[in-house]
C-alpha cells in the first residue's frame, strides 16, 4: 500500500515486508517528525477571545508542557538508535512534497531511499562527475525519475524496505510495551514516571 496525500499516515501503509511498527510507535513517530514543532508553540486557542483568556492561556501552557515531555521521551528513544535507523525513520515519517512519479515508483519508501547511504554516495559521485546539479538526494531522485522513469529508482526499494523493517523493529524494542506518548493522550502513569525521572 502506498501512502497518499489524503491519508499519508495510515498505519497500514507503513508495513515493510514482515515488519510494521506497533500502532503506538507509528503514532509517536508520525507526531514527532511532523507535528511536534507546532505543538511546542504555546499559543492561546481562538476560543480564548470568547472565554476567559487566563484559563485559555493555562490550557495552552499545559498543552505545550505535555508536548515538551512527549518530545523528550520520543527524542530519547530515537537517540538510542544508530545513525542509519534514525535517518531512515526520519525519511520515511517526515512529510515532504514529492512528484507523483516518485510517489508511484517508491510510495512511502521514498524518504527512506533518500536516506540510504548508497543513494547519498551515488548522488555525491554524480555531482562530483558533473552528471547532476541536484543539491540533495531527494532532488536527484526526482531528476532520475523524470529522465529515466520509475526503473531509475526502484532498485533501491528493496534495500529501503529492509532498512525500514530493521529501524521499526529497533524503535519498537527501544520503546517497549508502554502507552503511546503523543500529546493529548499521555496518561497519568507516564506523566508521573517521566516527571520523577527528570528530578
Image (tube, rainbow, N blue to C red):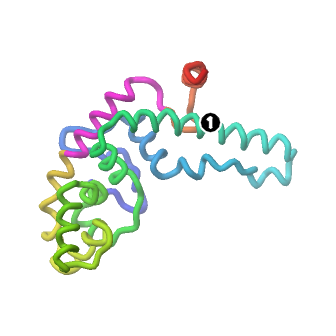
On the image, the x and y values in percent for residue 96 come to: 40, 63
**Does 196 sit above or below residue 133?**
above
Q: Does the rendering let one see residue 89?
A: yes
Q: From the viewer's perspective, is 168 left or right of 147?
A: right
Image height check: is 3 above or below 97? above
The image position of residue 159, as x and y in percent, is 16, 51
What secondary structure is marked by label 1? helix
- The residue that appears at 23% across and 54% down in the rendered structure is 116
Q: Residue at x 85, y 47 (%)?
A: 53
Q: Is residue 45 left or right of residue 179?
A: right
Residue linked to disc 1: 66
Q: Which residue is painted at 40% across and 51% down in the image? A: 9
- The range drawn in magenta is 163-180
- Chief secondary structure of the magenta portion: helix
Quarter of the image with the C terminus is top right
Front residue of 130/80: it is 130
**Residue 92 percent coordinates (x, y):** 33, 52
How dense is the environment of label 1, judged by Cα within 10 Å: few (below 14), some, or many (20 and up)? many
As drawn, is 75 to the left or to the right of 145? right
- Residue 24 colored magenta? no
Amino acid at each position: 500500500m502506498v501512502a497518499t496525500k489524503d491519508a499519508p499516515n495510515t498505519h497500514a501503509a507503513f508495513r515493510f515486508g514482515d515488519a510494521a511498527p506497533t500502532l503506538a510507535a507509528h503514532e509517536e513517530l508520525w507526531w514527532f517528525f511532523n507535528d511536534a514543532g507546532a505543538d511546542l508553540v504555546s499559543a492561546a486557542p481562538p476560543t480564548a477571545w470568547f472565554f476567559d483568556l487566563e484559563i485559555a492561556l493555562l490550557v495552552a501552557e499545559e498543552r505545550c508542557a505535555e508536548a515538551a515531555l512527549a518530545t523528550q521521551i520520543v527524542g530519547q528513544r530515537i537517540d538510542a538508535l544508530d545513525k542509519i535507523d534514525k535517518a531512515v525513520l526520519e525519511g520515511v515519517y517526515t512529510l515532504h512534497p514529492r512528484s507523483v512519479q516518485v510517489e508511484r515508483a517508491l510510495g512511502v519508501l521514498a524518504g527512506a531511499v533518500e536516506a540510504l547511504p548508497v543513494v547519498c554516495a551515488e548522488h555525491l559521485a554524480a555531482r562530483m562527475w558533473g552528471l547532476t546539479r541536484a543539491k540533495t538526494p531527494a532532488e536527484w531522485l526526482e531528476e532520475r525519475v523524470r529522465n529515466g522513469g520509475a526503473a531509475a529508482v526502484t532498485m533501491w526499494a528493496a534495500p529501503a524496505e529492509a532498512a525500514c523493517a530493521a529501524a521499526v523493529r529497533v524503535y519498537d524494542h527501544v520503546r517497549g510495551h508502554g502507552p503511546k506518548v503523543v500529546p493529548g493522550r499521555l496518561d497519568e502513569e507516564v506523566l508521573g514516571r517521566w516527571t520523577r525521572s527528570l528530578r
